[in-house]
Image (cartoon, grey):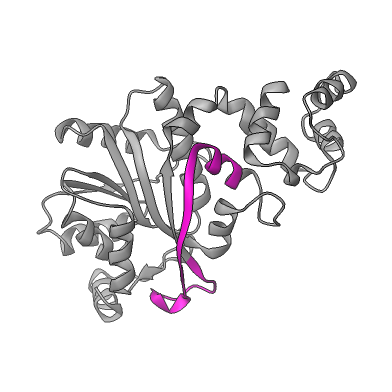
Amino acid sequence: MNRDDIRTFLLQAGLTPRHRFGQHFMINPDILDQIVESAKIKTGDLVLEVGPGPGNLTARLAAKASVVLAVDVDAALIVAARQWHRQLGNVQWLHADILSGKHAINPVVIQALCREAAEHQSDRYKLAANLPYNVACPLVAELLILDWHVHRGDKNIPRLAGMAFTVQWEVAQRMAAASGSRDYGALGILIQLLADVTIARSISPGNFWPPPKVRSALVEIKPVEEKMRRITDLPRLQKLLIGLFSHRRQNLANAIRHGLKPSDQRELEMKISAAGFNLKLRPEALKPEQLAALSQLI
């Protein structure tokens, strides 16, 4: 679907792009194809698509995967997309918010994933999407956190095989940022401690309709089993990252004092120093692996 097709689709449905849902529809067919390629979609795959919009990516995913679960919070849009693409027999359209609050995947979506996985005998799924800007950060983080719990045996749902999605350029930079950079923070550290992340390409605003005000990126994320195994207490690590990076301009000692508020600050500082950490460094100077090790001490 090009821009004119999307306009016709929306006009017939009596709809317009809705800013509050972060709707910017991809109209470049080459980039749509690249999303499918980056996600490595093949026969047998169960694919989760978030924010299918008019379904122009959905149709490409359905042509290669065994089943696509297309989830959209916009009820009117997903009804129109289901009707427009009624010939796609392997797409399950689901009206739901992908998130339950800010820090959990909607149980309705998880149930639908489990149902499709059981029906198609698949123990893994892939995310492929032109993500709505307003859900990208929490969604990516929560999918990886959920997969860590599945890896540990805490949850009985399909494993996450990989992700390929479009997102704001600034968010992509945060996800892939190296220690010491201005974009380095809790989000990127969490992702990098559980997965490999790659920015595949930059995408200019003109590839979307309506065009956003910012540049976007195509990002690939691949969960890594060895990395998952190294993290023994993810909630503790998350608490550490949030505490430290809410005071990222302070040195490590002060960031711990103000961000974590330990009852035994002096004893803790001695323990951290003995482990080889320089308390005068800022949290942003520590690499992800060092922060993971630090979480084991605190």
Query: Quadrant of residue 88 in the image?
Result: bottom left
17 relative position to 116: left or right: right
268 relative position to 216: left or right: right
Residue 159, can we see it?
yes
Q: Is residue 247 above or below residue 40?
A: above
Q: Nearer the viewer, residue 94 or 261?
A: 261
- Residue at 72%, 43% in the rendered image: 245
- Residue at 44%, 42% in the rendered image: 99
Q: Quadrant of the N terminus?
A: bottom left
- Residue at 27%, 75% in the rendered image: 11
- What are the residue bounds of the magenta stretch? 188-216
269 relative position to 204: left or right: right
Point out residue 161 in the picture as x, y percentages from the top left corner.
34, 40
Query: Quadrant of residue 113 in the image?
Result: top left
Point out residue 291 in the picture as x, y percentages from the top left corner.
68, 35
Point out residue 148 in the picture as x, y percentages from the top left corner.
46, 30
- Residue at 42%, 75% in the rendered image: 210
